[in-house]
Amino acid sequence: MKDWPGLFDLAVVGGGNAALCAAITAAKAGASVLILEGAPRAYRGGNSRHTRNFRCMHQGPMFPLTGRYEEDEYLDDLMLVTKGKTDESLARLAIRSSEDCLPWMMDHGVRFQPSLSGTLSLSRTNAFFLGGGKALVNAYYNTAADLGIKIAYEAQVQHVHREGDRITHLEVVVAGQPLTVKARAFVLASGGFQADLDWLARAWGPAARNFLIRGTPYNRGVVLRDMLDQGAESVGDPTQCHAVAIDGRAPKYDGGIVTRLDCVPFSIVVNRDGDRFYDEGEDVWPKRYAIWGRLVAAQPDQVGYALIDSKSVDLFMPSVFPAVKADTIEGLAQEMGLDPKAVRRTVDLFNAACRPGPFHPTELDGLRTEGLKVPKTNWAWPLETPPFYGYQLRPGVTFTYLGLKVDARAQVHTPTGPIRNLWAAGEIMAGSILGQGYLAGFGMTIGTVFGRIAGKEAAAHVA
Amino acid sequence: MSLDLTPGAEARRQIEICNACRYCEGFCAVFPAMTRNKAFADGDLTQLANLCHNCRGCYYACQYTEPHEFALNIPAALAEVRVESWERLARPQAFARVFQTQGVAMAGLLVVALAWFFWALTLWRPETGAGFYAHLAHNTLVMIFLPAFVLPLALVALSVRDYWREVGGGRVRLAHLLRAFDQAARMKNLSGGHGEGCNFEEGDRFTHRRRIYHQLMMYGFLLCFAATASGTVMHYALGWEAPYPLLSLPKLFGVPGGLMMVAGALGLGVLKLRADPALGAARVWGGEMAFILLLGGVALTGLALYAATGTGLVGPLLATHLATVMVLFLLMPFSKMVHGFFRLAALVAEAGKGNPLRK
Ligand SMILES: Cc1cc2nc3c(=O)[nH]c(=O)nc-3n(C[C@H](O)[C@H](O)[C@H](O)COP(=O)(O)OP(=O)(O)OC[C@H]3O[C@@H](n4cnc5c(N)ncnc54)[C@H](O)[C@@H]3O)c2cc1C
Ligand code: SF4
Ligand code: SF4
């Protein structure tokens, strides 16, 4: 900090993908830049360090992407998941700009690889980072350092000080010491608020305290709250968050990708009382995994139990923790803390409703139960071949939807007009485009596109 | 890393996390190989460990390294299993345990060898002979070195056979050998997958240094080996005895080979000092460093011996050079030297198993 100038051209709040894209873009345009990353160095990079790919439009094959994926198809995919809850012009901007991101990312150190094993369905639409999101974050930090960008870790921004239509300075606590940071322009890229359980509990109800947070514990929405309190315009449903069903034994925070479970389509899923509550075979897993977070969240104690028999145990990606295993259904129920009689009854009812027919794990096989209140419409194989396996499921929160409303220049607004020297990028403004649902790889696209826009606008502002 | 786990159990714990993640699939051969299994037998771990080149890419790219509770450190975990496998498959195991770990042990053996050669040189000085054969007759040399080379090599062969059994290697075809030699010749697994090198000595930045120094060492060593081999042929088949002039095969191979080895040893030594010891098998750091110095010593004394031709230094330099060579040979099954044999075996076995990602 000794070598910091008294006034930076640009101060960037956050240290994930969006922050780094903004900082690098501005520095290359000649601005002096400071990155304020709230996390310690070992945890730098927010949720970006847990990612694996971004969704990229392209008009023809372009390493590592196959085929082509054009604007309209991309937009259709987005419309489908958001059920129309999107700002179409911002969405088109993000989609169109994504094509240009790929070469930009490579120029700044990111490397790509063909889609990972088990994700072939994404090889056309999503470009995978070689080594995953942390490798991407590392590459950007190296590029930033080479560009002379100053980087402060454990630098928690507490307050963004506004006077009229301008931001004058930030109040920051750096490694426990309060500090005022002055700059001529500011970019907010500090992610969502999903790590603040109190906030989640206020929005969702006390059940939210049983949720697991898949990403960084440092995205607590402090800056978002501060801006909302100052009347910044917001977008996105404040009561909603994106949650998937993950392994109940995952750490409270930061369990990341490995805690996901892909077993549901080949299981029956029961709740605490041993009852099934939703069609496990409704669709292929990539299309359904995002609804299971909510389904489990709605069950008593926010917990579910996926039960499998040995016929199906090798049909899905390995899990990070070994499954609970037992030779009988009752034994399995016991080990998982469930009422053996209730589970036995559910399994017997289910098995009796299964019908013979061909079973195809990789396609909708139409092998369905008959006569159940909660049917299973594909992959309905009776649970009868020991040993039996079980996983506990809990809702794992990926991100929140509430954010700052921005325009096509990534500028932040109050009801009286734009704040002249303030831009936002990434998760903190993603609600502008992603009002509901989720499209794999779109979070990083939004961060990269709007990070670059914010960096460019901020640099032009101070030039 | 948890201290209460054996190397195998700790590696298994970590590999099972990777297998649910797979983000590092593009770095090297280890991660694709891992996708063949859901559970990992000891032999699977031995194979994965010997495929790993300790490039450290998967450490710096991992979102689960300490202080995260998953505490991943794949380069170290695999290094521990790897060294453990070399020790366990060596015979006698006790020798490997001592020399893999302790540079001091190697230095001690060197002192003994030095003393012995100085003594032998005064004792066995021949009546006639030119060059260094004036100090030690050719036949005496062969008598000493042939068994010192062949016996350790035989021990290595037995270890590699056991390795093959343990990892379930199949029938070897020419294509597998070609593939493995090609990968070793280019050190493909140190390329980072993107061809920009590895993360050995400069944190999360990629450099080619380790690959370059390693290749200088490896090809330098092979050239020196070729020098000795061509000298042997010339001696027996052509009746042309040492000393050889600069424009002869032994010297044309030997001098550049020796220079490459010296440069390689210097480079590898410096990189090792700069690299984070916690990302390797920390307990064998001393043994590995000693091995690098020994290789450098073999080359340096060989070059010095050549430079000193005709001077009074030939005697002591010859003793020193022969002592270093002797130690290198004797320790072949018990030092880092075995890594070459195991690494090749792992690559051949992997070629035989086929690429699991292109089923
Ligand atoms: C497990 C997991 C996997 C995912 N996989 C993908 C994927 O493959 N593809 C994809 O597109 N998206 C994925 N996402 C979503 C993706 O992570 C986000 O959309 C994206 O990372 C958002 O980037 P960002 O820069 O806005 O936020 P982040 O990367 O989360 O960065 C926010 C930064 O702000 C810092 N910060 C927070 N508060 C403060 C403060 N008060 N002061 C200073 N700094 C602060 C944090 O420390 C952090 O560095 C995944 C998310 C999770 C949880
Ligand atoms: S080292 Fe870490 S990032 Fe790489 S595959 Fe393993 S768990 Fe994933
Ligand atoms: S250290 Fe390098 S070679 Fe070893 S497993 Fe990791 S990425 Fe592969």
Image (cartoon, coloured by chain):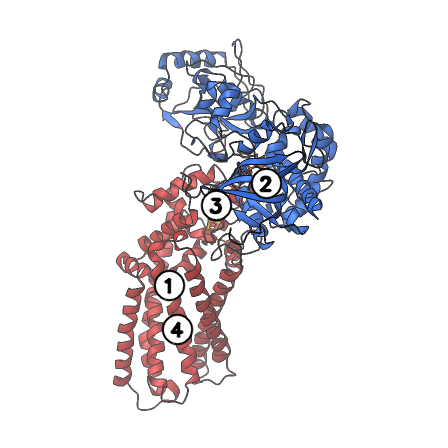
Chain colours: A blue, B red
**Mark 3 beta carbon near ligand 1 (under 8 Å):** no
Q: Give the residue type that dot 1 points to.
A: Met
Regarding residue A380, the answer to whether it shows in the image is no
| Chain of the residue under the numbered disc 3 shown in the image | A
Secondary-structure class at tag 4: helix
User: Mark 2 against mark 1, which lies toward the viewer?
Assistant: 2
Q: Is residue B177 left or right of residue A408?
A: left
| Chain of the residue under the numbered disc 2 shown in the image | A
Q: Position of residue B257 (x, y in %)?
A: 48, 73
User: Which labelled disc corresponds to residue B110?
Assistant: none
Residue placed most toward the observer, A142 or B244:
A142
User: Which labelled disc corresponds to residue A41?
Assistant: 3
Task: Find out whether residue A160 is within the magenta segment.
Answer: no
Residue placed most toward the observer, A329 or B19:
B19
What residue sits right under mark 1 in the picture?
B289
CA separation, marks 2 and 4?
Answer: 64 Å
Locate ligand 1 by image quadrant.
top right
Q: Is residue A393 left or right of residue A65?
A: left
Q: Which residues are magenta?
A: A310-323
Residue under disc 4 on the same chain as residue under disc 1: yes
| Chain of the residue under the numbered disc 1 shown in the image | B
Mark 3–mark 4 contact, CB under 8 Å? no
Crowding near the residue tagged with mark 3, few <14, some 14–19, many ≥20 C-alpha atoms within 10 Å? few
Mark 1–mark 3 contact, CB under 8 Å? no
What residue sits right under mark 2 in the picture?
A169
What residue sits right under mark 4 in the picture?
B298
Q: Give the residue type that dot 4 points to.
A: Val
Q: Is residue B330 left or right of residue A410?
A: left
CA separation, marks 2 and 3?
Answer: 24 Å
Q: Is residue B291 left or right of residue B227?
A: left
